[in-house]
Image: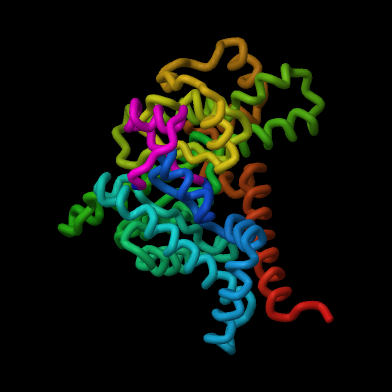
């Protein structure tokens, strides 16, 4: 990490609660350097982030995309765009190497997401996960918690890939993912293969669960306290955290998709990862908030009463609330997969505009 740090709540929390890791939900190099200075020890890249970064830093990335195209004259827009993602990921991963060495692989990793267009094939997800894991020593690869993704997660883990489970919103998805990671690790151990320092994580996209329940409440015209809906992702994540600890899973929980600052403050003190977008990290950093351990504080019973009156929340909250087949049809899953697929299309269009600008 940088020798210089930026004092504030994020830095203080990272020092007082080192078991609660702070990762940055962006591979933008400017943001990542600031995140590291504030105590960040991880980061993420995917088509959404790549599109945003390229659009924000056209002076850097437009010439680089043209250079990629010139070196690979037969490549289409998608291949060129994904090469930009790989390049962005490798450069961001290099900034995190000091943390990777300090934490012996547990932190200091750069998450790279598998191509959403491969979501129907476990074999192709595994192949790409292995490829991405070889980009740098501190890469962690994102695979979605769909039925096919769960199959791929076990096999990729067995093949030595450090996994970050994504497109995950419910306790059932998180538990299923942690279980197959454990099976993959056990298979490696049985064959005498190393597992030390692999550091898998299982994401719950807390804010996206909130978003989905708000849509359900509106769709079904339910009469509930709207403020209570801000706690849905927190409640599900806290329950998943308790189950992870009780069952002794190797994987840590990771909280992502922030919609409010409670999705940071309510998890302080836990042996998990907090991965806010930089704008949310900056809001916390500028707040003057004094971090205290709240991971073991239950959600208010009145809030839980409201949430448990919503059948869709119960499905998300109970560890057996969804079957693996239902992971794919859960509303938040469908909405997120569509967004990620759309980001692929947006990145293709951006590359096309760079290579073939309008006359």
Closer to us: 166 or 19: 19
Residue at 55 percent of width and 30 percent of height: 286
Residue at 25 percent of width and 46 percent of height: 102
Specify the quadrant of the image occupied by residue 260.
top right
| 78 lies above or below 317 | below
Q: Residue furthest right?
A: 359
Closer to us: 277 or 328: 277
Q: Position of residue 318 (x, y in %)?
A: 51, 29
Closer to us: 270 or 175: 270
Specify the quadrant of the image occupied by residue 301.
top right
Q: Residue furthest top?
A: 302
As drawn, is 162 to the left or to the right of 87? left
Q: Residue furthest front?
A: 4
| Residue 330 can be seen in this image | yes
Q: Residue furthest bottom?
A: 73
Q: Position of residue 87 (x, y in %)?
A: 48, 68
Q: Position of residue 356 (x, y in %)?
A: 73, 81
Specify the quadrant of the image occupied by residue 293.
top left
**Residue 6 lies in the magenta-colored region:** yes
Which stretch is magenta?
Answer: 2-24
The quadrant of the rendering that contains the C terminus is bottom right
Residue at 81 percent of width and 78 percent of height: 358
| 69 lies above or below 50 | below
| 292 lies above or below 109 | above
As drawn, is 197 to the left or to the right of 25? left
Residue at 60 percent of width and 58 percent of height: 53
| Residue 147 can be seen in this image | no
Q: How is the image coloured?
A: rainbow
Q: Position of residue 351 (x, y in %)?
A: 66, 73
Closer to us: 67 or 330: 67
**Residue 336 lies in the magenta-colored region:** no
């Amino acid at each position: 990490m940088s020798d210089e740090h930026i004092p504030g709540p994020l830095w203080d929390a990272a020092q007082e609660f080192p078991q609660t890791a702070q990762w940055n939900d962006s591979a933008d190099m400017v943001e990542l350097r600031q995140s590291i200075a504030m105590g960040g020890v991880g980061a993420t890249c995917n088509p959404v982030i790549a599109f945003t970064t390229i659009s924000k830093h056209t002076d850097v990335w437009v010439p680089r995309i043209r250079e990629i195209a010139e070196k690979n004259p037969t490549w289409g827009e998608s291949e060129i765009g994904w090469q930009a993602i790989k390049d962005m990921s490798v450069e961001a991963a290099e900034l995190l190497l000091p943390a990777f060495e300090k934490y012996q692989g547990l932190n200091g990793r750069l998450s790279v997401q598998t191509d959403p267009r491969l979501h129907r094939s476990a074999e192709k997800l595994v192949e790409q996960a292995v490829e991405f894991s070889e980009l740098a020593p501190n890469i962690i690869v994102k695979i979605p918690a769909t039925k096919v993704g769960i199959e791929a997660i076990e096999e990729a883990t067995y093949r030595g890939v450090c996994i970050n489970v994504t497109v995950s919103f419910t306790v059932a998805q998180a538990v299923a993912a942690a279980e197959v990671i454990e099976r993959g690790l056990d298979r490696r151990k049985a064959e005498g293969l190393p597992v030390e320092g692999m550091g898998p994580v299982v994401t719950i996209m807390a804010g996206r669960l909130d978003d989905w329940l708000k849509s359900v409440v509106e769709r079904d015209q339910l009469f509930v306290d709207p403020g209570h809906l801000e706690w849905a992702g927190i409640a599900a994540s806290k329950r998943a955290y308790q189950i992870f600890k009780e069952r002794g899973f190797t994987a840590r929980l990771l909280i992502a998709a922030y919609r409010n600052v409670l999705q940071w403050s309510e998890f302080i003190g836990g042996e998990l990862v907090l991965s806010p977008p930089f704008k949310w990290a900056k809001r916390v950093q500028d707040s003057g908030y004094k971090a205290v351990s709240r991971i073991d504080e239950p959600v208010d019973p009145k809030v839980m009463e409201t949430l448990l009156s919503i059948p869709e929340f119960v499905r998300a909250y109970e560890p057996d609330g969804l079957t693996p087949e239902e992971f794919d049809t859960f509303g938040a899953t469908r909405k997120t997969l569509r967004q990620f697929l759309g980001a692929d299309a947006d990145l293709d269009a951006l590359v096309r505009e760079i290579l073939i600008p309008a006359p």
